[in-house]
Image (tube, grey):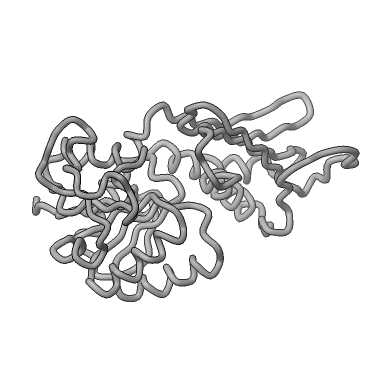
């Protein structure tokens, strides 16, 4: 298998460190560039030192000089950074794996357009288990379409800046699509005070933030006399990193196009 040269955005962050470890342990990937914000205190340091394994790759804040020679950029940063990286990848012909969440409609449209020129795998969650859950939710929604109220509960660490999580929103989209609904018109993102009785057509979301929770997601189908819950709990970011590398392998032979983890895992 051909070795792919990888660039990692946000390499000194929590997810960046998990990606550095995954690349270091892989046989078919080589770290070519490690990126951070220009004002990061990690600029100039050996990226491998972050995970206790120096590798000779210095962390850089210069996007243009870091991308040449790279095959794929893996990005789990923030929307504004991801769009900056996207434009640079298009200019340099570098493919992308995007796990960033909280994108606006306009930012998503820019990714859609860029996919005409480069291959991109984009998913709110790169975990193999979570993407299996998406398939299970589609089946459950069709079977439990009548007489069941649907709520989605998610929990993450205190540092997460967007809510609900991209994974929770994707769960809602899968359920809404299976039921022939528009999530934007049926979602309820918070309840307080006298809200009245629950409308059966809604999909509710509840958000928990605290501590170092990596990511817990539960879809509840609550009927009369029974309740079905489909849950995924992540105990390590390594699962997302392994999925991201699997996505990078998937687009190795693709010149352009927008794909997600359902494509990567052959679940379509």
Q: Nearer the viewer, residue 196 or 158?
A: 158
Q: Nearer the viewer, residue 252 or 235?
A: 235
Q: Residue at x 77, y 24 (%)?
A: 225
Q: Residue at x 30, y 42 (%)?
A: 12
**Is the residue 112 above or below the residue 155 in the image?**
below
Q: Quadrant of the C terminus?
A: bottom left
Q: Nearer the viewer, residue 137 or 59?
A: 59
Left or right, 178 with respect to 21, comes to: right
Left or right, 101 with respect to 244, comes to: right
* Number of numbered discs visible in the structure rendering: 0
Q: Position of residue 134 (x, y in %)?
A: 50, 44
Q: Residue at x 90, y 39 (%)?
A: 194
The quadrant in which residue 116 appears is bottom left
Q: Nearer the viewer, residue 158 or 267?
A: 158
Q: Position of residue 121 (x, y in %)?
A: 35, 58
Residue 11 in sight from this viewpoint: yes
Q: Residue at x 55, y 44 (%)?
A: 165
Q: Position of residue 193 (x, y in %)?
A: 87, 38
The quadrant in which residue 115 appears is bottom left
**Is the residue 201 above or below the residue 120 in the image?**
above
Q: Position of residue 228 (x, y in %)?
A: 64, 29
Residue 138 in sight from this viewpoint: no
**Is the residue 130 above or below the residue 113 in the image?**
above
């Amino acid at each position: 298998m051909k070795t792919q040269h990888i660039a990692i955005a946000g390499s000194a962050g929590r997810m960046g460190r998990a990606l550095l470890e995954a690349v270091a342990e892989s046989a078919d990937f080589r770290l070519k560039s490690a990126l951070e914000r220009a004002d990061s205190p990690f600029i100039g340091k050996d990226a491998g030192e972050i995970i206790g394994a120096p590798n000779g790759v210095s962390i850089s804040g210069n996007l243009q000089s870091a991308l040449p020679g790279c095959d794929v950029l893996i990005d789990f940063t923030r929307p504004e950074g991801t769009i900056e990286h996207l434009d640079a990848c298009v200019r340099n012909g570098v493919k992308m794996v995007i796990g960033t969440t909280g994108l606006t409609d306009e930012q998503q449209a820019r990714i859609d357009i860029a996919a005409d020129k480069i291959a991109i795998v984009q998913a709110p969650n790169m975990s193999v288990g979570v993407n299996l859950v998406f398939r299970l939710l589609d089946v459950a929604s069709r079977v439990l379409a009548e007489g069941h109220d649907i709520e989605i509960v998610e929990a993450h660490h205190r540092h997460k800046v967007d809510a609900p999580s991209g994974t929770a929103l994707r769960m809602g989209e899968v359920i809404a699509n299976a039921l022939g609904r528009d999530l934007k018109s049926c979602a309820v993102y918070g309840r307080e005070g006298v809200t009245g009785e629950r409308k059966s057509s809604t999909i509710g979301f509840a958000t928990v933030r605290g501590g170092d929770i990596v990511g817990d997601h539960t879809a509840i189908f609550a009927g009369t006399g029974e309740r079905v819950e489909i849950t995924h709990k992540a105990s390590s970011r390594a699962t997302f990193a392994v999925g991201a590398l699997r996505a990078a392998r998937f687009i190795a032979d693709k010149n352009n196009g927008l794909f997600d983890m359902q494509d990567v895992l052959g679940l379509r």
